Image (cartoon, helix red, strand yellow):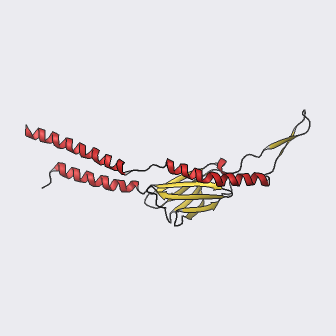
Amino acid sequence: MINRLGMFSLVLLLVLLFGTECLAHKITVFGYVDQAMVKTESKFSGGRPAKGCQLTVLTGMSPVIVGRTDEKGMLDFPVPEQHIGFDILVSCGEGHQGKWRIDTEELGRPPEPYISTGSPQKKVTLPVQDSALQLMIRAELAAELGPIKHQLAELKQDSVSLADIMGGLGYFLGLAGLASYMRFRRDGK
């Protein structure tokens, strides 16, 4: 017959083993702007691609784009017409979801530069239209910086290692051992 402490330890061990299962379903979302397209990649915390998950683009509280990730956990879509910052929400059901924010500055629409014409006393400013050179530079920068942003996002993600799990189990086994010792000492007197 298992005593109370043994039963408590068994239940605690089962909760810990199945509790780490929940951490394995966290979704990491990454997105960046490349020319007029937003490229996204979604993964579970173990690195597996989040296949067939619903991806929603939200500006404020209203969805602008809704789609599904492919076999690699990726989905590309055009930059929303509003050209304002937006959130990318990826959901795989049962509360498993991740989020990524794309700010307005990343959309490649910087404020238009102004040039000055006229005499020093009276200046007239005219907006300079985007030239082909500016568009080429912007496209090249986006292509070069996209993979770097992706690597930074992967470094930022929280992961649970085997050492973390074993340390947690050791902590709880130590508490169970302390409780057993105290009970043995109390019953021994």
Give the quarter of the image for residue 67: bottom right
Q: Is residue 60 visible?
A: no
Q: Where is residue 178 shown, x and y percent of the image?
A: 20, 41
Tell how many labels. 0
Give the quarter of the image for residue 174: top left
Q: Residue furthest left?
A: 189
Q: Where is residue 78 shown, x and y percent of the image?
A: 65, 60
Q: Is residue 65 visible?
A: yes
In the displayed structure, would residue 49 be above or below residue 171?
below
In the displayed structure, would residue 179 be above or below residue 45?
above
Q: Residue at x 65, y 49 (%)?
A: 106
**21 relative position to 184: left or right:** right
Q: Residue furthest top?
A: 121
Q: Where is residue 101 shown, x and y percent of the image?
A: 57, 50
Q: Where is residue 159 shown, x and y percent of the image?
A: 43, 50
Q: Residue at x 61, y 53 (%)?
A: 146
Q: Residue at x 16, y 39 (%)?
A: 182
Q: Residue at x 27, y 46 (%)?
A: 172
Q: Residue furthest right?
A: 119
Q: Where, quadrant-wise, is the C terminus in this rendering?
A: top left
Q: Where, quadrant-wise, is the N terminus in this rendering?
A: bottom left
**26 relative position to 11: left or right:** right
